[in-house]
């Protein structure tokens, strides 16, 4: 095949991909109604594609280069692109065993979503999660829903990756929000919790907020610190109790549902699971930390 023929063939492939995307774009509202308020949309570009055709479309529109500062036109285009990938993801989920039995309902409006979630028990709440929340700006804004940016905010789960430093004078621990071993201390865990508490106080009618506290293996196995696990977790618990009132927090005892321990509770009344649609997986958590 000559260079000219190869160039023509490649151009035809690109034109076909563009046509496929335009056809999908034009019929988007008829083909799918994706609820942007109850779904996590972080890095949807990382979702595996079902086939090569979807891969080609993904590469062609370069979803990885979505900006954080948009004109109105950019916002509309970004939302369409996100909806496009949500459709692909929902199709793909049908064949993933981990999602079997999980009913992620789609809602026309945020008000409808909010109304139904308030009628569900804790084990059946559906919501949007923020992964690596420290990297997504204000925690307050991640929790707050705005109709102007419905595909952002409105989360009900935040993830705090934490590291610690030890005060050798009184054996207390100071916790910081960071992601990896080569961290730069910028923000204390208490500062992040204070933003959550402020949102809670300013929005009394909000849904439960689930906080995932992520401790990497290297955090608990630092050679230069002899970790006392009881003191460590008592100090961590103290961070919450210094900021939240007891009535603001679900504690494990409340979630035992009258039984002596978690085993008996699950054995008699079934597993307590909170199912969330996240870009990485479905997170099944045994209990919530705060709401």
Image (cartoon, grey):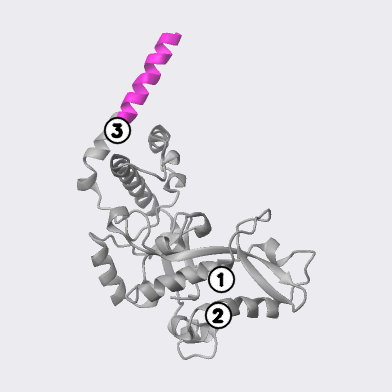
Magenta stretch? 1-18
Q: How crowded is mark 2: few (under 14 residues within 10 Å), some or many (20 or more)?
A: few
* Residue behind mark 2: 242
- Secondary structure character of the magenta stretch overall: helix
- Residue 190: assigned label: 1
Question: What is the crowding at mark 3: few (fewer than 14 residues within 10 Å), some, or many (at least 20)?
Answer: some
- Of badges 3 and 2, the one in the foreground is 2
Residue 16 drawn at (x, y percent)? 31, 27
Above or below, comparing residue 3 to residue 81 in the picture: above
Give the distance between the C-alpha atoms of the residues marked 3 and 1, in whole angstroms.
Answer: 49 Å
Q: Which residue is drawn at 62% across and 65% down?
A: 176
Tell me residue 273's x, y (percent).
Answer: 45, 73
Please report contact status of discs 2 and 1: CB closer than 8 Å, yes or no: yes
Q: Quadrant of residue 207?
A: bottom left
Q: Distance between the residues labelled 3 and 2?
A: 55 Å
Residue 161 x %, y %: 58, 62
Q: Position of residue 89 (x, y in %)?
A: 38, 49
């Amino acid at each position: 095949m000559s260079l000219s023929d190869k160039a023509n063939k490649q151009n035809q492939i690109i034109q076909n991909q563009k046509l496929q995307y335009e056809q999908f774009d034009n019929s988007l509202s008829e083909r799918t109604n994706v609820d942007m308020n109850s779904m996590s949309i972080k890095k949807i570009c990382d979702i595996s594609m079902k086939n090569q055709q979807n891969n080609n479309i993904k590469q062609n529109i370069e979803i990885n280069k979505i900006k954080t500062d948009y004109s109105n036109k950019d916002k509309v285009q970004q939302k369409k692109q996100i909806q496009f990938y949500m459709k692909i993801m929902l199709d793909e989920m049908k064949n993933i065993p981990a999602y079997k039995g999980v009913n992620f309902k789609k809602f026309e409006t945020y008000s409808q979503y909010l109304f139904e979630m308030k009628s569900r028990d804790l084990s059946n709440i559906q919501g949007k999660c923020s992964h690596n929340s420290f990297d997504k700006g204000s925690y307050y804004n991640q929790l707050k829903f705005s109709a102007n940016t419905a595909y952002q905010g409105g989360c009900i789960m935040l993830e705090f990756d934490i590291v610690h430093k030890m005060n050798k004078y009184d054996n207390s621990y100071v916790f910081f929000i960071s992601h990896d071993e080569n961290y730069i201390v910028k923000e204390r865990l208490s500062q992040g919790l204070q933003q959550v508490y402020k949102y809670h106080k300013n929005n009394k009618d909000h849904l439960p907020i689930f906080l995932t506290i992520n401790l990497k293996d290297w955090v608990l196995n630092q050679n230069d610190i002899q970790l006392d696990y009881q003191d460590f977790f008592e100090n961590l618990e103290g961070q919450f109790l210094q900021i939240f009132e007891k009535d603001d927090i679900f504690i494990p005892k409340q979630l035992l549902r009258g039984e002596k321990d978690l085993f008996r509770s699950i054995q008699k009344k079934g597993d307590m699971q909170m199912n969330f649609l996240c870009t990485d997986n479905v997170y099944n958590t045994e209990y919530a930390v705060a709401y």
